[in-house]
Each structure stands twice: as C-alpha cells, then as structure tokens.
Image (cartoon, helix red, strand yellow):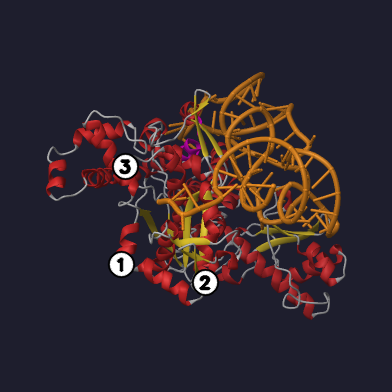
RNA sequence: GCGCCCGUAGCUCAGUGGAUAGAGCGUCAGGUUGCGGACCUGAAGGUCGUGGGUUCGAGUCCCGCCGGGCGCGCCA
C-alpha cells in the first residue's frame, strides 16, 4: 500500500538527506562517474545518525553497500557521490546576516558539508536554516508536531486484555493492558485509525463456576474444585441481592448460572474501572456468545467448508491447518456437536474484517503461541491476507516480593491486583516501566524495588525537565520576555544547536516507533531530550532581561523542547506536569 | 522429543548489518554568591551465553550446542 501522504508535514531531516543522496547518485550515474544509478541497482539509500558528533549530523554507508554491485572501491564511490553532492551543499554554517526572504529556505541547500570518512562513509552537516524552519513549525502547530495526519493510514483493530470477567485484573494482566494501549497510541501517532477491542466470554462454564463459588460462600460450604478463592468472591457474596437465588429458581434457572452472570457483570464493571485508572478505554466489547448468536461462527465454518479445508474424522469436524504449515489439524466442531474456542476465533476474524479493518492485531500472552498458526491459517484459508492477521505475544512478568515470586492464580486467590500495584507505584511510573521494554521479553518486576526506585524512575527525570521549562516560561512572562516569532539565528550557538538537533529528530522517532510497533525508542528519546535540555540549561541563560533578543530566541527553542517532551509523554499516556 | 520466545555492565533493560556496544539504578570522586539540586561533571564496571558460518563489516542474519521460560487437548 502506498505510504500515507503528509501534505501538512515537512519532510524529516533524514528524508531530506536520503533525497539529496539519491539525487547525487543519479547525477553521478548520468555523468558516468558511477556505472549505474539508483533505478538500476537494488540498494536502498539509508541514512543514520552517527554516534559521535564529529562525524556530522547524518551519515550514510551507501558507498560500502555499492562497492560490490558497482565493482568499485568504496572510497572511489564515496568520492564520486560527494562531488555530485556538492551541488546540494552550501558552505557556511551560520545564516545570520544573510538576506533571505520568507520562502528562500525552500530553495536553499539543507547541508553545509559532505565529507568522506572512514572506510566509506559520507558524513553530512546540517544547515541551521533547516533547524530554524522545523522549530518554527513546532511552535506554529504543536498539536501535530511529529505525528502523521490523523486517520491518514490503515484502519487497524487491536484486541487486548480480553480477560474473562471471573475476577479483578491482576498485575499479570497489566502487561497486556499497557502493551496494547501503548501500541494503539503509537499507531495513532503514525496516522492509523485504531479500534481498541476487548473480547470475552460471559456465558461459559467459568462464569458458572464463579456463581457456584459465591453460592458456596453463602452456604458456608467449601469452594468447588473449579471455583474461585479470592477475597473478591467473598465481597461478591456479601453484595449479592437477597432475592437473587429465589428469582432464579422461580424462573426454573440454575442458580449458579444466574448468580454467575450477576457476579461477572459486577466484575466487569470493576475491570472497566481499573482500566480507566490505567488510562485505557476500549471502543468495542465483544462477547463470544454474540458471535454465535449473530451467526458469524456458523458462516465462517461454511466458508471453510466451501473452500475445501474441512473434513470429518472420529465424529468431529477438522480444519486442515497443516495444509498451511501448522503442526497438526485442528478441531472446529467436537464430536458432541459443540464448537471449539477456535471456531469462535474463526468467526471473530470474519466479523472483524466485515467492519472494514485493514489489519488485525492480537495481544496475547506467551502461553498462546501455540494458537497463533491456526488462526492465521484459517484466515488465509478463508481468503484473507495472512499478513493482515498479526499476533503480538507478550513476555512474562515475574512479580517478586521480598525475593520470592508472587503467584498469580485467580482460582487459588493468590494474586496482586492491578489496582494494588498502581496504588503502590503510580500510573506514570508503571506506564514508563512497560513502555521502555519490548513487549515480548520476560521481565522481573520486584514490587518493593519498584516502589523504592519510583523516586529515581527516569519518568520523573523527563517530567522534571518539562516542569522546569514550564517554570522558566512563567519566569520569562514575569520579566516581560516572550519567545521569538522568527527563529532566524536562534540556533547558531553551540548550546542551541545541540539541543535543536535533538528536538528536530522527534518525527523520525515517532515514525520508527509506529513502523516497529514499539515504544522503547520513545522512552529512550525522551530521556535523551531531557538530558539535552538539562545540559542546555546549564550552559545557556534563558531568561535574561539584559539580552532580550537572545532570550527571545532561547525561549522559542525551549518552548519547542517543552512541546516535544509533552508530545512524547502524551504518546505514552504519561502526564506532563507544569510543576512537581 | 518437537515448536515458539529469551540470554548484553553488580541490578533492571535499550541497541533499523556500520565507525570506540549505551541508559537508568547502584558504587566511587567532584560541582551552585544564576532562570527549579527531582539537576550537572567525571570514574570504575562487558570474552554481548557458547562454537562455527555469511559479510568489506555481526550484539544484530544463518546453523549447532548450553541455560531459562512457554506451548505441544474434541480446555479456555
């Protein structure tokens, strides 16, 4: 699919660099300096950020990659490219004192220097006017800074948490809840239209077991073998309306069922409340029962049958998943005629696609990896694009308290609830904790350590930078100083240039995060930006009534920094306080 | 046994095939007659589990092994 158009977004710095290098390559090919151009060689132009500042602002290893296909030494290719690049270069770093019109920047070169370095790198140095122009854009439209235009991309469904309402959410569910919501936020920043979806079963035997457990407590009887033992079951028993059982019997209904349904609705309200405190709000709640009731499961099975991927054996109906690479075939209808959970999954896939989604994402625990293949295979068998059905498996979180692992069994009643966790360490710290780690890695979460370290958590470092800037801006207003409306010359100083170069990188971070469907780079970047600001703050006095012009430029830069910090934190669902 | 995930600093974790592998915490040594010291500067600390391979170049890709986790139901 074509990339989303971004009419109101300026190109990122690296996109500008890629374009310039590609043009230089084509030019070198047309003059014969290089034997072939970009359209003749299958090597993509890639630009990276050198680790060391002396290597410039941007670098490419294109000469190294072209050495083999062009049958030339990397050094010779680098020479040819840099001399072709010379037309893209405008020496002289400062723009001060230059007579330029308002739209003159568009025609000017984005680089001041291109040099060959090392075994075949080309290093580029960025012109100040590029920074000025981008920073001006930040101040002009802070809300859209770094983000792709809303709704410009694919329509994506993200299903996560999906815990059955048989007990409160545990810290074990936190992983999926944060991972899913963070993914949604990052996709939205990348321009996708996202639907947050929660799937659950409110009519299965688990619900009946919950009801039976509540009744057992009321009858002062032992909890059934498959029942639930948590404290919350006792709470439910206390809150159960007195006439609930009598009403069920009057309707000739199994009391355990009736009580189970009441209890699970109650539990679901609690789950929604917990999610709300996490900052997670679902758009759609779908029950397994509703899929059957609306015929989705039945129709999906017919679709598989029509495509010739079903067969009967031992009285059951099987999907030939092995045809699509699975280990074994999978039962869709049991020999007793009951559909399997897998059958519901198949129906759900068709139901989701019927709502017009381009892409389905499932956030599952690592223990579900065995079911990934069958669902994707069934989608393929029904004629959908397998690549459009994606499962993200979260790693395990081992919660440790006082050196021992805390078990997380709802049945045994030994678990820490999400609410308890958040009461101990706070939503911002918890969000940062999960955002800064890959979704699929296993994590040790020492609750006491997290509490102790919460004051040292990097999230506060970033928030502090934001609050510090807010304080500076207040101070400036009191002194009658305000940010410059014109960024010209505002980044000429070393301190300014260093900070500005970090700020301007933000859109690339968001772009990469959306593409990778990960947030670790966002937390890393936010920390880096906060560090860059603190260093700037050390070296450059911002509020200085004796130097109003310089103050104005620095205030503009600092305001752009604040906007970027706030945007990055918002992307993670974390607050950006003006004071703390 | 087969399959999937993981293994990077004392701890918790980052690291689109690129230049001397990073951050936070912890440890040690320093810093403010200035806009928020929840800050800043510096140091110590690594056979990137291990052995091969691909490549101009591997923490990153491929194969084997070791260690840990999770799966391998007509359960959900």
Secondary structure type for disc 3: helix
Badge 3, how many Cα within 10 Å: few under 14, some, many 20+? Answer: many
Q: Position of residue A292 (x, y in %)?
A: 33, 63
Ranked by sequence position, the earlier of labels 1 and 2 is 1
Chain under numbered label 3: A
Give the residue number, with chain letter if any, for mark 2: A309
Point out the residue furthest to the bottom here: A30
Is A460 included in the stretch rendered in magenta? yes
Chain under numbered label 1: A
Disc 1 versus disc 3: distance between alpha carbons? 26 Å
Give the residue number, with chain letter if any, for mark 1: A294
Highlighted range, magenta: A456-467
> Mark 2 and mark 3, same subunit?
yes
Question: In the rendered image, which quarter is residue A474 located in?
Answer: top left
Mark 1 or 2: the one toward you: 2
Is A333 included in the stretch rendered in magenta? no
Circle 1/circle 3 CB separation < 8 Å? no
Chain under numbered label 2: A
């Amino acid at each position: 699919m074509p990339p989303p158009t971004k009419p109101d977004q300026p190109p990122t710095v690296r996109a500008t660099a890629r374009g310039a290098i590609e043009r230089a390559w084509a030019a070198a090919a047309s003059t014969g300096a290089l034997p072939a151009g970009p359209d003749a060689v299958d090597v993509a132009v890639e630009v990276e950020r050198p680790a060391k500042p002396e290597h410039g602002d941007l670098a490419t290893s294109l000469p190294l990659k072209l050495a083999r296909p062009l049958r030339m030494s990397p050094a010779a290719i680098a020479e040819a490219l840099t001399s072709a690049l010379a037309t893209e270069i405008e020496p002289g770093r400062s723009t001060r004192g230059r007579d330029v019109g308002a739209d003159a920047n568009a025609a000017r070169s984005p680089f001041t220097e291109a040099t060959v370095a090392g075994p075949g790198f080309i290093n580029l140095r960025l012109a100040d006017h590029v920074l000025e122009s981008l920073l001006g854009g930040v101040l002009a439209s802070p809300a859209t800074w770094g983000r792709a235009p809303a709704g410009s991309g694919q329509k994506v469904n993200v299903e996560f948490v999906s815990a059955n309402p048989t007990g409160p959410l545990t810290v074990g569910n936190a992983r999926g809840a944060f991972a899913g919501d963070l993914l949604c936020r990052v996709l939205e920043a990348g321009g996708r239209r996202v639907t947050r979806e929660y799937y659950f079963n409110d009519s299965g035997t688990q619900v009946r077991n919950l009801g039976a457990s509540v009744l057992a407590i009321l009858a002062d009887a032992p909890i059934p073998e498959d029942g639930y033992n948590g404290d919350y079951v006792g709470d439910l028993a206390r809150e159960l309306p007195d006439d609930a059982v009598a009403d069920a019997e009057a309707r000739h209904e199994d009391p355990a069922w009736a009580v189970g349904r009441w209890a699970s609705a109650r539990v679901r309200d609690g789950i929604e409340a917990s999610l709300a405190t996490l900052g997670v709000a679902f758009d759609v709640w779908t029950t397994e029962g509703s899929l059957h009731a609306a015929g989705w499961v039945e129709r999906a099975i017919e679709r598989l049958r029509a495509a010739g991927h079903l067969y009967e054996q031992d009285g059951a109906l099987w999907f030939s998943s092995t045809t699509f690479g699975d280990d074994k075939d999978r039962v869709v209808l049991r020999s007793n005629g009951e559909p399997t959970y897998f059958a519901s999954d198949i129906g759900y896939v068709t139901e989701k696609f019927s709502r017009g989604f381009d892409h389905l994402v499932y956030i599952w625990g690592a223990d579900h990896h065995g079911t990934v293949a069958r669902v994707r295979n069934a989608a393929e068998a029904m004629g959908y694009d397998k690549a459009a059905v994606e499962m993200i498996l979260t790693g395990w979180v081992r919660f440790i308290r006082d050196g021992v692992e805390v078990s997380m069994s709802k049945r045994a009643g030994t678990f820490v609830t999400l609410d308890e966790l958040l009461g101990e360490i706070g939503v911002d710290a918890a969000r940062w904790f999960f955002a800064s780690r890959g979704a699929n890695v296993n994590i040790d979460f020492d609750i006491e350590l997290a509490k102790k370290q919460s004051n040292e958590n990097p999230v506060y470092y970033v928030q502090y930078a934001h609050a510090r800037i807010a304080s500076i801006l207040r101070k400036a207003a009191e002194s009658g100083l305000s940010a410059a409306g014109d960024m010209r010359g505002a980044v000429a100083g070393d301190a300014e240039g260093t900070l500005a170069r970090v700020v301007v990188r933000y859109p690339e971070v968001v772009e990469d995060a959306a593409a990778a469907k990960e947030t670790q780079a966002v937390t890393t970047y936010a920390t880096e930006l906060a560090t860059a600001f603190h260093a700037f703050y050390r070296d450059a006095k911002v509020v200085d009534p004796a130097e109003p012009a310089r103050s104005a430029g620095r205030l503009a830069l600092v305001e752009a920094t604040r906007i970027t910090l706030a945007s990055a934190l918002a992307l993670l669902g974390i607050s950006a306080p003006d004071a703390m």
